[in-house]
Image (cartoon, rainbow, N blue to C red):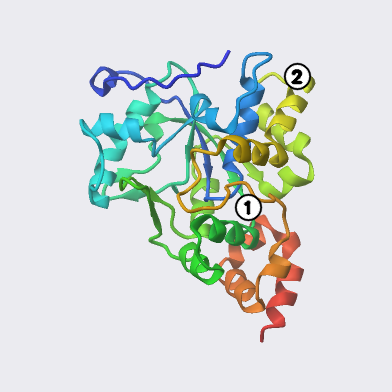
Amino acid sequence: MVDLHYPVRDVSSMQQQDLRRIIWLASFPKSGNTWTRAFLANYLAPKGTKLTINQLNQFSTGDVRQDFWDAAWGRPFQDQPVETGVALRPKVLKLIAGSKPSHHFVKTHSRIDRIEGQDLIPASVTVAAVYIIRNPFDLALSYARHLSISIDEVIERMTSAGGVNITATQIPEFIGRWDNHVSSWTGARGLPLHLMRYEDMQANTERSFRKLLEFLQIPQDMGALRRAIRASRFKELRKQEQSEGFGEKPAGMDRFFASGTTGGWHSAMSADQVRRIGEEFQLALERHYPEMLPQIHETMGSSR
């Protein structure tokens, strides 16, 4: 049975508790995090219940959710410098960890790092993580549309070590370079982690989500699995967005759910853009996307 509420509690009562309760659903933006949450929400929902995209925040929460930041700050958190957000984040994460009595899912786009003496993903609140990775070429197309900027501008963001996303009220997300983001999670020592490639999720959705349930030690019911897959497919999510909107869609964005397909970069990117991404992220591509290298090199060669 899924608890569909995330109450905000007093952090002072949590000081002596074991708060290692968070299972992170982590990814660089536009890598399949919402898809994964939609599947898990529908798989774990009470029998006969179908959760829509605007109910995902009842199933899982996020590390930039406003009410937790307000509670940690003691008043509405807004218009504060990034340094203040860094200092406040540990208190926020304790509140999030303590909002449920056992393991629960928390979305994050943060990398694993230590900034100004503060761990962005503290071991003290972490039990495990699911990391969703998407190839940086398709990701760049989706991220550019998400931010309403050009592909060249989004490549600048993806290759910036100091990249930070800021919410409307100035809550910071510390993202950084795509390759550093990936390696910070996949190389984290001692962290029980399950890696999911977006491309594999597309190619064999059932197999990918079965492996996810196996990692999470959740009993598998094939009927429930297939119903959850149908409830979370892009066609269904787009339909829901069209009929009721989506609360997580950035202001000014036409639609959150586009095609969700892979390989669009072949026709949408210039050879020079492919070359830049390929050169910047060569080592990560060799490790996580070796099957893409021949086509990347062929396209890069045509730009010389």
- Residue 161 in the image, given as x and y percentages of width and height: 42, 62
Q: Residue at x 57, y 47 (%)?
A: 256
The residue pinned by badge 1 equals: 134
First of labels 1, 2 by sequence position = 1
Q: Quadrant of residue 5?
A: top left
**Residue 194 in the image, given as x and y percentages of width and height:** 61, 38
- Residue 2 percent across, percent down from the top left: 55, 16
Task: Give the quadrant of the N terminus.
Answer: top right
Q: Quadrant of the C terminus?
A: bottom right
Q: Residue at x 33, y 26 (%)?
A: 95
Using residue 226 as the reference point, say whether residue 51 is left or right of it. left
Label 2 SS: loop
Is there any visible trace of residue 67 in the rendered image? yes
Q: Are marks 1 and 2 in contact (CB under 8 Å)?
A: no
Image mark count: 2
According to the picture, the residue beneath numbered tag 2 turns out to be 221
